Amino acid sequence: METLIKLNHLTKIYRMGGEKIYALDDVNLEIYKGEILCILGTSGSGKSTLLNMLAGLEAPTKGEIHYGNIRLDQLSEEELTLFRSLNIGFVFQSYNLIPTLNALENVSLGLTFKGIPRKEREKEAKKMLELVGLGDRLTHKPSQLSGGQQQRVSIARAFVGSPSIIFADEPTGNLDSKTTIEIIELIIGLAKENKQTLIMVTHDESLTDYVNRSFHMVDGRIQKITERERSNDEN
């Protein structure tokens, strides 16, 4: 399999008074192109810090983050912003929708930064909202949508423009069990269909049933890696 991301000795240290807190402690891993995986751990395990490092939202104290020939840890803020806008989509637990914008506007907003003309942005946003089952909610604002519907808007926003990598940070944390299954199957289905790499951060071990590999984190380290046996249609 083709390596998409490689981390070498990734370390993140926070200082509290005279004490050093290791949020990440010498993490080494490879993530493959088109892989569906999750990073598991309890609060304080380092999983969210690892996601932030992978997405270029925080700089490591030590170590290297390779995306092919690109060293993410060496890019300027301007270069990081451009890299994220071209390559990364985000799904958040709290949805992070702009309350004054309707569903279509929330989804098309990210395409603005890619210089895509308005008509094309709206066409792509509408197509994505239809794919996630919200074709009849285009003009609804977040306050007029249920939690599951808001998360579907968030998913459409993450996938619009076909970024190569999708990060999902506790994507089902605010949802009931029935909606959780619907949302996970939707996210994974879209990623597989478009051959995108999907990285989910969660404390919910049931999500390991849906992914290729799971990284279990404890105290800033990857304690173990589990791999789900692939069915014939996944090979």
Image (spheres, rainbow, N blue to C red):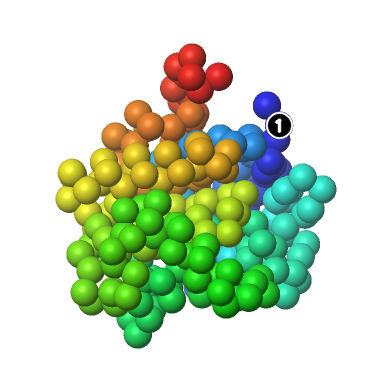
Residue 94: name its quadrant: bottom left
Whether residue 213 is visible here, answered yes or no, is yes
Q: Is residue 152 left or right of residue 30?
A: left
Q: Residue 26: x, y in percent? A: 62, 44
The foreground one among 189 and 65 is 189
Q: Amino acid at mark 1?
A: Glu
Residue at the image point whose x is 72% and y is 48% from the top = 67
Front residue (pair 96, 130): 130
Residue at horizontal 29%, vertical 67%?
A: 137
Residue situated furthest bottom in the rendering: 100
Quarter of the image with the N terminus is: top right
Q: Which residue is mark 1?
A: 2
With respect to residue 127, does 229 lie above or below?
A: above
x and y percentages locating residue 162 in the rendered image: 58, 53
Callout count? 1
* Position of the C terminus by quadrant: top right
x, y percentage for residue 111?
A: 58, 70
In the structure shown, which secondary structural element does the residue marked by tag 1 occupy?
loop
What x and y, as percent, mark residue 218?
Answer: 43, 42
* Residue 135 shown left or right of residue 201 in the figure: left
Foreground of the two, 74 or 27: 74
Q: Is residue 170 above or below residue 34?
A: below
Q: Quadrant of residue 148?
A: bottom left
Instruction: Determine if residue 222 is in view.
Output: no
Q: Residue at x 34, y 39 (%)?
A: 185
Judge whether 18 appears above or below 7 on screen: below
* Classed neighbour count for the residue bearing mark 1: other residues with Cα under 10 Å, few (<14), some (14–19), many (≥20): few
Give me the residue at 74% from left, 69% from top: 79
